[in-house]
Image (tube, helix red, strand yellow):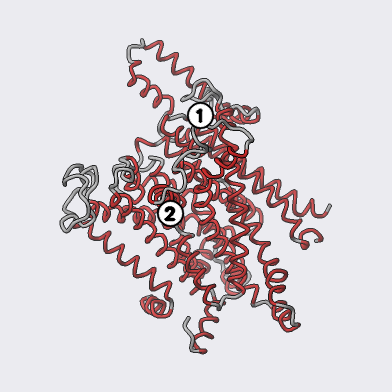
Amino acid sequence: MFMIIRDLYRSDKKFAFGFTVICLLIFLALLSFVSPYDPKLWNVVPKNRPPSLHYILGTNSMGQDIFWNLTHAIKNSVFLGSLTAVISIFIGTFVGLLSGYRGGGLDRFLMSVNDSFIVIPSLPILILISSIIKQHINLILIAFILALFSWPWGGRQVRAIVLGLREREFTYMANFSGMNTFQIILTEHLPFVIPWVMANFINTILWAIGMETTLAIFGLSSLETPTIGTTIYWALQYQALLRGIWWWIFTPVILAILLFVALYTLSVSISNYLDPRTRIQRMRMKEGGSEA
Amino acid sequence: MNLLKRYIIPRLIQYFIVIFIGVTVVFLVPRFTPLDPVVTVLNRMTSYGAQYLDPSAIEKLKETMMELYGLKGSIWEQYLNFWKRLFKGDFGPSLSIFPTPVISIIANSLPWTAGLLVVVAILSWIIGNILGGIAGYYADRRWSKVMSIVAMSIYPIPYYIMALVLLILFAYIFPIFPMVGGYSIGLTPSFSLEFIFNVIKHAFLPALSLILIGIGWWFLSMRSLTSTIVAEDFVTYAEVMGIPSRKILFQYVMRNGLLPQITNLALQIGGIFSGSLITETVFSYPGLGQLLYMAINNGDFNLIMGIAVLSIIGIATSALLIDLLYPLFDPRVRYR
C-alpha cells in the first residue's frame, strides 16, 4: 500500500498534486482540534476585520475567526463525505456482488431499481426530505440520506466486474465445494472488487460534499455546524459580496474548488492505475524513456 | 418488429418502473419521517398569532389541512388517491400563494427551466464531444494535454460554486452581465427582438456556468472513449489504407464514440437538471429552481411535492426520448 502510494506519487503528476493538496487539507482539518474558539459561538472576535497577522483570514460579520472556522468546516465536510461514502459503498457493493453473481430475475429486479435511482433526479427528492426534517437535521442524518441516492453508480460498476468473475474457474470450484452465495461473493469475489471500490469511494465523497454544499445553499443543511456549504450560506445571507467583505466568501469558494479538483484528480489517477490497459501504456512509456 | 420487441418494449417497461419507483419514494418519504407537516404548519400558524382559536376550530383546521395535503385515510387509500390525483395533474393548492393550484404555478416557470436545460444540454454535449474526440485522437500533442488539464479542473467544481464564481467575476468585478432575473424589470414579455435579446443576455451567465461544467464532463468521457477506440484494429487498418486522418477522426473514431455518449446523455440528464435548479437560484432566474427555493422558504409542502414528482416524470421522459432516438444513430440496433 505504502509502496504503491510512493510509486504513484513519483510517476503520476496528477496523483502528486491531488495527494499533496488532500494532505494539506487534512492537516488543516486536524488543526481544528486545537482551535481556540468554539465554532458554534458567535461574537468571540471583533467583526468584519480584513486579513491581518492576528486574524490570518480575517473575521466575519458573526464575530468568528474565518481561519479557525474553516478548519472545522473542512473537518465536518470531509467527515460527512466519508460517512456517506462508507454507507453507500456498503449498499452498492453488496447489491452489485449479489446481482452479478446470482443473475436472472434477481439481477433484473436489482438493476432496474438501480437504474431508476440513477435516472431519477436526486436533488428535488433530497430537498423534499430535508425540508421536512429541517428542524432535526444533523450531519449524520444528511449522510444517511445522501447515501440513499449515491449507491447505484457503484452498484453498476461492481456488477459489471462480477459478471466477468462469475464464469471463472475458481467460482465453479467454490460452488462445487459447497460454499453458499454469500460466502462466495464475500470471500471469493469481494477481494477482486475492492480496488475499484476505492476509486468509487473517493468519487462518492466528492459527490456528497457537493450535494451537502448545494443543500446548505438552500438553507437545508445543519446550519449551525460549519461545513464548506454552510460557510458560503452565511456569507451570502450577510451579503458579504455587496458589503465588500470579500475574504469571507472567497475563502470557502477557493477551498471548495481546491478540494474538489484534488479529490477528482486522485480518483482519476487511481482508476487509471487500476485499468490494465493504461498500465501497459505506462510501462511502454517508461521503456521509451518518456514521462508517464 | 424485431426492433420493437428487443429494444423499444423493454425500454418502455424500464420507463414505467422508473416513474413508479420515483413517485413511490416521493410519496413514502414524507410519511415515514417522524415529523408531521400538518403539525409543523399548525405550529407556524399559531406562532403567527392564531393562538386565540378555540380547540375545536384548530381541530377543524387540522382536518382541512389533512385533506389539502392528501393525508386522509389509511396509507393504501392515500397512495391510490395520490396516483389518481397525479393522473389528473392535481397536486392540490399551493400554500404560500393560496389557493392557486400548484400545477399552474409550475406551468408558469417550467418554460424557463426547460428552455435553459435544452439549450445547455445540447450545446455542451456537441462542443464537449467534438473537443474530446479531437483531443483523444491527438492525445500526444501538447494542446491536447493542456485541454485535459483545464477540463479536469473545471469538471469537478459543483454547479453552485461555478455559478457563484461567474457571478462574482462578470456581474460584480466586471459588470458586463446583469446579476439577477430572467428579463429586465419594466419589459413586458413579447416576441419583439428587444425582449428576446434581453432574455438571452439574462440567461447567458446561468447557461455559461452549466455549459462549462457540461463541456468538462463530455470532454473527459469522450476523450477516454476515443483513446480506447484509437487502439482498435479498424483504425489501424484505416491508417494503413492511407485514409486522411481527419476522415478517420470524424467518420471512424468519433462516430463510434458518440454512441455510448448518447446513452450517457440519457443517464446524465437528471444531473444536468439538478444543476440548472441550483444555478437558477444563484442568478434568481425565474425557473423551477427559483420556485423551489421560494417553496422551501415558505414551507410550501404541496409545491415541493409537485416539483419533485413532475421533475421525475419530466426527466424520465426525456431520458426515454433520447433512448428511443438511439436506433436512428446506431445501425446495429436497427438491423439486429
B53, above or below B42, in the image: above
Mark 2, residue position = A87
Task: Give the residue number, with chain letter if any, for mark 1.
Answer: B302
Quadrant housing the C terminus of chain B: bottom right
Judged from the image, the secondary structure of the residue bearing numbered disc 2 is helix
**Percent x, y of residue B29:** 49, 37
Q: Which chain does the numbered disc 2 sit on? A: A
Question: Residue drawn at (59%, 73%), measured in percent from left and top?
Answer: A173
Examine the rendering and report whether any part of residue A229 can be seen: yes
Decide: few, some or many residues near mark 2? Use Cα within 10 Å; few <14, some 14-19, many ≥20: some
- Residue at image point 41% right, 24% down: B41
Chain letter, disc 1 residue: B
Quadrant location of residue A235?
A: top left
Kindly identify the residue that appears in the image at 42 percent across and 39 percent down: A130
A62, B193: nearer the viewer:
B193
Q: Amino acid at mark 1?
A: Asn
- Is residue A176 visible to us here? no
Classify mark 1: helix, strand or loop: helix
Question: In x, y percent, where is residue A91?
Answer: 48, 54
Picture layout, residue B124 above or below residue B254:
above
The reply, left or right, for residue B295 in relation to residue B114 is: left
Instruction: Say which amino acid is labelled 2.
Output: Ile
Q: Is residue B239 above or below residue B224?
A: below
State the image quarter where residue B2 is shown: bottom right
Give the percent coordinates (x, y) of residue A118.
56, 51
- In the rendered picture of this protein, how many numbered marks are placed on residues? 2
